[in-house]
Amino acid sequence: MSLTTPFSVQKLQTALHAKAKESPDFRFYALYEKVYRKDVLAYAYERCKANGGAAGVDNQTFEDIEAYDRERWLDELTQELKSRTYQPQPVRRVYIPKPNGKQRPLGIPTIRDRVVQTAAVLVLEPIFEADLASEQYAYRADRSALDAVQHVHKLINTGHGQIVDADLSSYFDSVPHAELMKSVARRVVDGAMLHLIKMWLEAPVEETDERGNKRRSTRNRDQGRGTPQGSPISPLLSNLYMRRFVLGWKKLGHEKRWKAHIVNYADDLVICCRVGAKQALTAMRRMMSKLKLTVNEMKTRVCCLPEEKFDFLGYTFGRCYSMRRSRVYLGTGSLEETGTAHLSCDQRRDRAGYCQADSTGNGREAQSNVDRLGQLFLSGVRQQSLQCGRSTCPPQAASVALR
């Protein structure tokens, strides 16, 4: 279901974005009161309803709210926010399978909390969108996994053949609260808004064991790390923190030193280098350590094209063979060619690194990107190279040198 943003909300977002773009150092105030504006909160509710999703710990569904009277429900929520008595409820935790047999934890906030978080995103996103780096492709308007794949393809076909194929361990669960809040406070001076975000970061988690017993954990608050993966606010916060790495990479001169360009989608990233990939990997490890993030050493490596291949967002990049022209070239293989066609939608999204909860709608957007990748084409960026044929390099072509 496609929703049209109300004109009044569009006007607000346009004004916030324009100010953020015009004044990079400006810190915004009086944002909290915009979260419970009637038009903003009503539109946030409609977005959450359109996305659907399961009930949270209170078991309240959209049908329950409609039966109760939506306007009355929204008025009561508005009063809670206005009087500053609003408190987020615990997040219900569920698990989805990963391709490696492990499980990925996913949080499902109550509808009430999803609506308030979505309203906050409507207000904050235009501000931080002005600051996000062009290398970041996840959860942004007019950007997608397809664009990220196109960017990587362009880089490898313009001489950036040394690849740092990076993987972060539990990125969403590892983001440190203190540093993340500093990133938010760089633009937001409104104490009530900052307090709202902090409450969401520290919300307890409730899970049900095999025997049906419920238990609550305050891990995020106790350890001071982790974003509520699966909630509407999580994509914005995760992008905001990853921005530190992307900008730091440039500021420290690594991009120029090794002609090393980052392409990032959520917690998935590659660094395409002309030279010095091993040094770039060392620098990346050092930076991630300072950001209090953990590099998954089992999955992180340097890949040198054309001798090797690497996967990114469900596609394999590397040496391909053209049956029609009987030649070898650098190209991109589809899901079927890379052996992931048999995986479930959740597993594909998990492999691509951008699986989000159905409750936010981000998962659906990501899945549509996977579907679009199946029809991949590049306009103006060596279109023919992407048509890897439906056959990757045959054995006899393995020794053919690229020219």
Image (tube, rainbow, N blue to C red):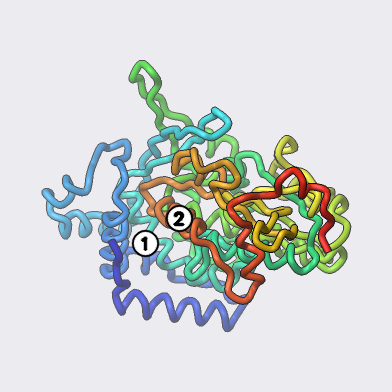
Q: Quadrant of the C terminus?
A: bottom right
Q: Specify few, some or many for label 2: CA neighbours under 10 Å numbering under 14, 14-19, or 20 or more.
A: few
The residue lying toward the viewer, choosing from 172 and 268, is 268
Q: Quadrant of the N terminus?
A: bottom left
The residue lying toward the viewer, choosing from 36 and 231, is 231
Under mark 1, the amino acid is: Ala
Q: CA distance from mark 2 to mark 1?
A: 29 Å
**In this rendering, is residue 21 above or below 397?**
below
- Coordinates of residue 338 in the picture (x, y in percent): 60, 45
Of discs 2 and 1, which sits in the foreground? 2
Q: Residue at x 65, y 48 (%)?
A: 311
- Coordinates of residue 107 in the picture (x, y in percent): 43, 40
- Coordinates of residue 182 in the picture (x, y in percent): 62, 58
User: On residue 119, which mark appears?
Assistant: 1
Whether residue 192 appears in this view of the structure is: yes
Under mark 2, the amino acid is: Asp
* Circle 2 residue: 371
The number of callouts visible is 2
Whether residue 181 appears in this view of the structure is: no
